[in-house]
Amino acid sequence: MESHNPVESKKSSCSNASCCAPKTPIIRSSPKVGRNDPCICGNGRKYKKCCGKNT
Ligand SMILES: [Zn+2]
């Protein structure tokens, strides 16, 4: 008669991230700002010449 404690194995049944990926929304670092608009960081440059050139 086996009496294992089932609480010990009460972890996530799947540790494979590609199988059961967490539901995290894709947050892109590109807010709604036009490329010719002033940059969101507020240094006075155009977005495409500042933070926008990385995206
Ligand atoms: Zn910027």
Image (cartoon, grey):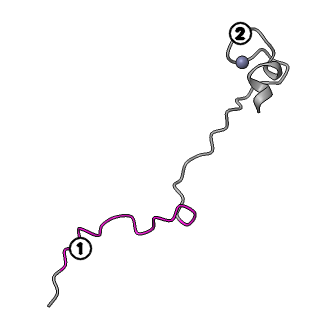
Is label 2's Cβ within 8 Å of ligand 1? Answer: yes
| Image quarter of residue 10 | bottom left
Residue 33 appears left or right of 25:
right
Main SS of the magenta part reads: loop
| Image quarter of residue 14 | bottom left
| Image quarter of residue 6 | bottom left
Residue 23 lies, in percent from the top left, at: 53, 53
Question: Which of disc 1 and disc 2 is earlier in sequence?
Answer: 1
Residue drawn at x 78%, y 14% is 38
Above-or-below relation of 30 to 45:
below
- Name the residue tied to disc 2: 43
The reply to whether callout 2 and callout 1 are in contact (CB within 8 Å) is no
SS category of the residue bearing label 1: loop
| Magenta segment | 4-19
Gap between marks 2 and 1 measured at Cα: 58 Å
Q: Amino acid at mark 1?
A: Pro
Q: Amino acid at mark 2?
A: Asn
**Number of marks in picture:** 2
- Which part of the image, by quadrant, shows the C terminus? top right
Residue 32 lies, in percent from the top left, at: 73, 28
Residue 34 lies, in percent from the top left, at: 81, 24
Above-or-below relation of 25 to 33:
below
- Give the numbered dot on residue 6: 1
